[in-house]
Amino acid sequence: MQALVGTRVHASVQHARQLRTSALMIGTPSLRTSNIFHLRGSFVARSADDKAAHLPVGDSTDSNGHDMQMQSSGSMAVPLPEQPVVPVPTGPIGIKVVPALQAIAVGLAIRFLIPLPAGVTMQGWTMLSIFVTTILGLVLDPLPVGAWAFIAITATLVTQTLTFAQAFSAMTNEVIWLIVVSFFFAKGFEKTGLGERIANLFVRALGKSTLGLAFGLNVAETLLAPAMPSTSARAGGIFMPIIKSLSAASGSLPNDPSRLKMGAFLTQAQFQTGIHSSSLFLTASAQNLLCLNLAYELGAEVPNQFFQWMAGAALPSIVGMVVTILLVYKLCPPGITETPEAPKDAARRLEAMGPMSRDEKIMFGTMAFAVVLWVAGPSIGISAVLAAMMGLCVLLASGVLSWRDCLTYTPAWDTLMWFAVLIGMSGQLNSLGVIKAFAGSAGALLTSLDMHWMPIFGMLHVAFFTIHYMFASQTAHVGALYSAFCTMMLTAGVPPVLAAMSLAYSINLFGSITHYASGQAAIFYGSGFMTLSEVFKIGALNGLVGFILWGVLGMPVWHLLGWW
């Protein structure tokens, strides 16, 4: 009889363990970080808010995981001996040797096997070899992005290519800190539940399909873009938190296979369509105005800038947004496509959430305050990053976010590290004259071909687009190459307005080809819903499609507008 009872207790304990392991593996929010135990006749998972889920199982274990055998009186629990813990299998630890050697080999070949080009110093050439190794490492993934970037920047110091101040000069870059603070805003959306509430409102209105959600989010960004010219602020402060909440509500979690249910598609769709929504209005992105100002200095004046910009961008931009979402839907199909009951479920969740809490109201007010400053700030001397920092101060002072919340939000600090490294390297390539030397050589070659301006116009655009793989900022690309390429076009006979406007549009089109191509790229990649290979593959394809689409649809429109 004792043996029979012992067998029954052991079987029930094993069954309970299986249930508990399953709950943890599927990532159920209320079970994943819970104190788990089970009482006689029921399995109980208690989360931080003391909600419990009951499943019928055997006898009991305590909250520390000790096996408990209930005596016949039901009033006493005696712990059984500790069971050996089976180690959880882990992935490879440390560097992946083959991908690392491949990346390093290419860099060494550039440094020691390719002759030094005219106009480039040995310091600049070494910097280029390290930069190429860094980019290849990000593609081949021998280490996490931040770790590889740290090794790369250390290599610039070991080889005395850069000083410490030069290597970490980008740590003071405003765009980078805007991204970091935007991550903290995302944490606030998550912690207060405001993101969940907004997500449910979207689902209630557009949630019958995942595709409908993607179109709804894209329309929302397009309408907001003219008044909010920071693409990084739009991505990190508004849309990425909403996407994370929508995905979580559907059981789609970052850095997890479940990301493919919804999160990966929505993130990629929002990321890739940004190249078109940022191009529709002159004020939709800060670099748009910068380009036209630089063109004016070269004598390529654009009259009635706001109208000309929108008229030239409307057709390719709107068509591009639709085509891009459909293309991403094919390339990164969501596991959840049709959700006919989702609007009703969202309505019920909103009703259960009740009115907005104190923290939600503060979070909403802070974001509204930040958006107003992002719109009106330039006229009163408040930059986008300062507006974001002021908003974060409000969240910290009110207790909506604690400093520990910020310290433990690792995506923000990881992005700060690797993005600062890439922007710093890119800036040093420009300072050392490497990029200008390449641009000058390409321009001299094209102008010597004695061709009509139209093919030269096309080839310069291809070069201007492709070279962005060497840049970690759209603004940096504008500062380094816009004037040079515009000058080459004007020299080749390209009409001034066409040269100025087409290059300005192109700046937006390569904003999603890599995870470092722009400020918003770093935010979307840092969400955990996209892998590095997906970013490069889908980014390259969408960039190519967008490039061709703007050329095919844009040129006839620009002809009608009298640009050529």
Image (cartoon, rainbow, N blue to C red):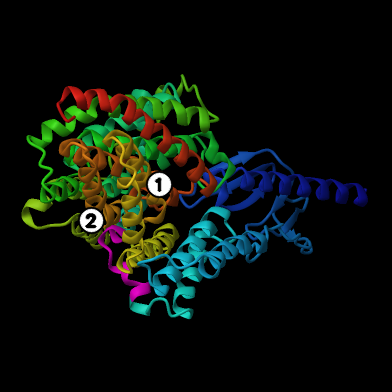
Q: Say which residue appears at 48% left-offset and 63% top-offset.
A: 146
- Is disc 2 in contact with disc 1, using a CB cutoff of under 8 Å? no
Looking at numbered disc 2 in the image, what kind of residue is underneath it? Ala
Q: Say which residue appears at 57% left-offset and 56% top-offset.
A: 141
At which x and y percent is residue 364?
Answer: 24, 45
Q: Answer with left or right where residue 20 lies relative to residue 474.
A: right
Q: Which residue is mark 2?
A: 388
In the picture, the disc for residue 343 is none
Estimate the spatial distance between the alpha carbons at disc 2 and disc 1, rounded to whole Å.
32 Å
The correct choice, above or below, for 352 with respect to 405 in the image is above
Q: Is residue 277 visible?
A: yes
Q: Which residue is mark 1?
A: 466
Which residue range is magenta in the image? 166-178
At which x and y percent is residue 558?
Answer: 21, 27
Badge 1 marks a residue whose secondary structure is helix
Q: Earlier in the sequence, mark 2 or mark 1?
A: 2
At which x and y percent is residue 291?
Answer: 19, 47
Badge 2 marks a residue whose secondary structure is helix
